Amino acid sequence: MRISSILACLACAAAASLSLQPWSATRPGPCTFEVNVASQESGLVQLYFDAGRGLSEQDSSIQPILAGQPRLLRFELPSGTLRALRFDPLDSYAKMTLSGARIVGPSGATLVAFAPGQFRPNYQIDAMRVDGDKLFVETSPGGFDPQLVIPLSAPIVIPRPFWWREILGFFTAFLGGLLLVLRVGR
C-alpha cells in the first residue's frame, strides 16, 4: 500500500467529518424543549430561543399541530447559554391547552421544568387561565403571530455534545476508505 493511498483515505475521512461542522455554535445540542399541546385548530407552533443573538427566525424551531390531536412537541435546542425563550402557540387564532413544559437532557431527565403560571402573554393573546398543571390559551381572532414568553430566573446552559460522534465518523470513513483501497489494490 502506498502512502498516497493512505493520505487519500485520510483526506476523505476528514472531509466527511468536517461536513458535520462540529465547531458550529448553532448546531443542535443534546437537549430538547418538550411540551404537551392540544389545539382546536391546526397550524404551526414555534419556539424561539436567545442563544446570544436575540430572538430571531434563525434561532427557532417549528412543529406542526393538528386540530383535535393532542401530542408531545419536541423542539431541538442549540448548545450554549439560553438567555430567553418565547413560545408562539399557533400562527393563527386558536384555543389551546399546554402542559408539561420542560427542557430534557440526553438521558431523558428533566433539566428545567416550567409551570403553567410561568408563561406570560406577550402579543395577540386574548385569554390565559391556569388550571392545575394545564395552561389554557386563547389567541386573538385575526392574530397572525401570538406570543408567550417564558421568563428565565437565570440563563440555561445547554452543554455541547461530545465530539466522540465526529471522531467515530472520521475513523469509520477512514477505515472504510482504507478497506476499499486494499480491496481495489488486489
Image (tube, rainbow, N blue to C red):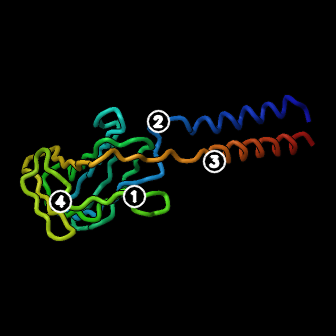
Foreground: disc 4 or disc 3:
4
SS for tag 4?
helix
Q: What residue type is labelled 3?
A: Trp
- Residue drawn at x 20%, y 61% is 116
Spatial CA span between label 1 and label 4: 18 Å
Foreground: disc 2 or disc 1:
1
Placement of 3 over or under 121, stated as above or below: above
- Residue drawn at x 80%, y 31% is 7
Residue 127 spot, x, y in % from top left: 7, 56
Residue bearing mark 4: 117
The label shown at residue 111 is 1
Spatial CA span between label 2 and label 3: 17 Å
* Left or right: residue 167 compared with residue 6: left
Residue bearing mark 3: 164
Q: How crowded is mark 1: few (under 14 residues within 10 Å), some or many (20 or more)?
A: some
Residue 91 spot, x, y in % from top left: 20, 48
* Left or right: residue 185 compared with residue 81: right
Q: Earlier in the sequence, mark 2 or mark 4?
A: 2
The label shown at residue 85 is none
